[in-house]
Image: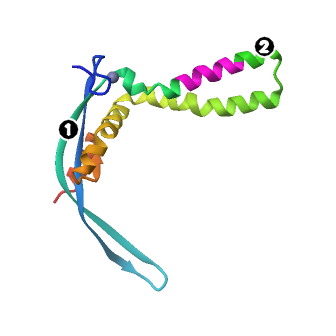
Amino acid sequence: MICQKCNTNQGVPYTFYYGRMVDKKSETISQTANDEVFRITEYFTLGGQESVVLCSKCLRGGCVFWLLVVGLFFIGLLLSFGLSSVLYFLLISILAPVVISIAEYNSDSKTKGVQKAIEFRKTALMQQGFDTFWTPQQYANLRKNIN
Ligand SMILES: [Zn+2]
């Protein structure tokens, strides 16, 4: 299957669900003199499901990856000039979140894929009046609450 984003690489389909919130009700469960507990119930209608084919290259996004490359390049450059500990500390604190986000991405590319698929179709679906998007996981949880 060809990636729908770049139309060049082979990709994998990622499925998500979309719908619309039709009502929101807030009711008081318990009430004391200075405390009140609410239950908020949201009502949705399911619009349908869609699959978007995305390749690993489009999933990676590129931006974070190149930030890391550039960052490492600067570390190397500064090391060759002899680096003060303050600068070194700054660089590490800038790079650490980047490294962590890459690690996170690798750990759940499945979820990431679904999120990217939603991002890819969101604008078009919102123009059709849908305002809520669920991953298959979230949708499964939602179905448990249908009575
Ligand atoms: Zn692609």
Query: For the residue carrying disc 1, how many other residues have a C-alpha within 10 Å: few (<14), some (14-19), or many (20+)?
Result: some
* Alpha carbon separation for disc pair 2 and 1: 51 Å
Q: Which mark is residue 101?
A: none
Q: Is residue 55 above or below residue 94?
A: above
| Residue drawn at (27%, 63%) of the image | 42
Q: Which residue is mark 2?
A: 80
Q: The disc labelled 1 sits on which kind of residue? A: Glu
Residue depicted at x 81% and y 22%: 83
Residue 113 lies, in percent from the top left, at 34, 31
Three-letter residue code for mark 2: Ser
State which region is magenta. 66-75
Residue 103 position, x and y percent, is 50, 27
Disc 2 is placed on an element classified as helix
- Ligand 1 location (quadrant): top left
Q: What secondary structure do most residues of the magenta stretch adopt? A: helix
Find out whether residue 128 is within the magenta segment.
no
Total numbered labels placed on residues in the image: 2
Q: Secondary structure at mark 1?
A: strand
Does residue 68 appear to the left or right of 13 in the view shown?
Answer: right
Give the number of the disc on residue 50. 1
- Proximity of marks 2 and 1: CB atoms separated by less than 8 Å: no
Which residue is at 28% across, 47% downward?
133
Query: Where does the N terminus fall, quadrant-wise?
Result: top left
Q: Is residue 69 magenta?
A: yes
Name the quadrant containing residue 88: top right
Q: Is residue 141 visible?
A: no
Place residue 135 in its image quadrant: top left
**Can you say whether 31 is above or below 119 in the image?**
below
Q: Is residue 45 above or below residue 55?
A: below
Nearer the observer, 66 or 89: 66
Return the residue nearer the eye: 86 or 127.
Answer: 127
